[in-house]
Amino acid sequence: MTRRIFIDKQSPKPYHALVQTSEAVRAAAAEAGLERTLVELLNLRVSQLNGCAFCLDVHTRAALRAGEDTRRLGVLAAWRDTDLFSQPERAALALAEATTVPSDAAAQEAAYADALEVLTEDQISAVVWVAVTINAFNRVSILSKHPVH
């Protein structure tokens, strides 16, 4: 394997700005009424789509600390095929997926329309920001090859 540079260590100022953004997004999500468990589910689902082992490890532990159920974590990749997630959670998960894979315009439109039915505008904004920031962290960890210990 080619040696990788941990870009968060090599260029700490941009990484610190990303961490600050993440903290602001977490606060906005809380202010919008999104539960911490949902934010962690969004972080996990986006990380699953991106294949980021490091972020999956970090956010699985964070979801458990926040009180998320192991059964729901176990089926998260197939959330559409179970009734373990509420309608607002499903809308948020679909919107986070559409943010992560924006090339599917039809899915993006459908996800946004569904979100408008069950989430407030503040919640929609927070969901998109959660997806945007975890996507950025996924890229940092994937390209740096951050190890899972």
Image (cartoon, grey):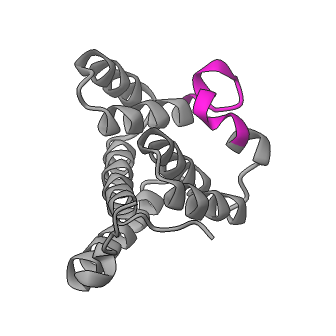
Residue situated furthest top in the rendering: 106
Task: State the image quarter where residue 15 is shown.
Answer: bottom left
Compared with 75, 2 (above or below) is below
From the top left corner, tell me how far across and down residue 32 is, in percent.
Answer: 42, 54
- 48 left or right of 83? left
Compared with 136, 89 (above or below) is above
- Specify the quadrant that holds the N terminus: bottom left
Compared with 106, 11 (above or below) is below
- Residue occupying the point 39% across, 72% down: 23
* Residue 20 in view here: no
* Residue 38 in view here: yes
- Residue occupying the point 46% across, 37% down: 92
Q: Is residue 132 one of those drawn in magenta?
A: no
- Specify the quadrant that holds the C terminus: bottom right
From the top left corner, tell me how far across and down residue 79 is, in percent.
Answer: 61, 28
Q: Which residues are magenta?
A: 74-87
- 145 left or right of 82? left
Disc tally is 0
Compared with 94, 65 (above or below) is below
Residue situated furthest front in the rendering: 1
- Residue occupying the point 55% across, 36% down: 89
Q: Is residue 80 one of those drawn in magenta?
A: yes
Task: Looking at the picture, tell me which residue is in the foreground, 31 or 52.
Answer: 52
Secondary structure predominantly adopted by residues drawn in magenta: helix
- Residue occupying the point 43% across, 36% down: 119
From the top left corner, tell me how far across and down residue 46 is, in percent.
Answer: 44, 44
From the top left corner, tell me how far across and down residue 20 is, in percent.
Answer: 31, 76
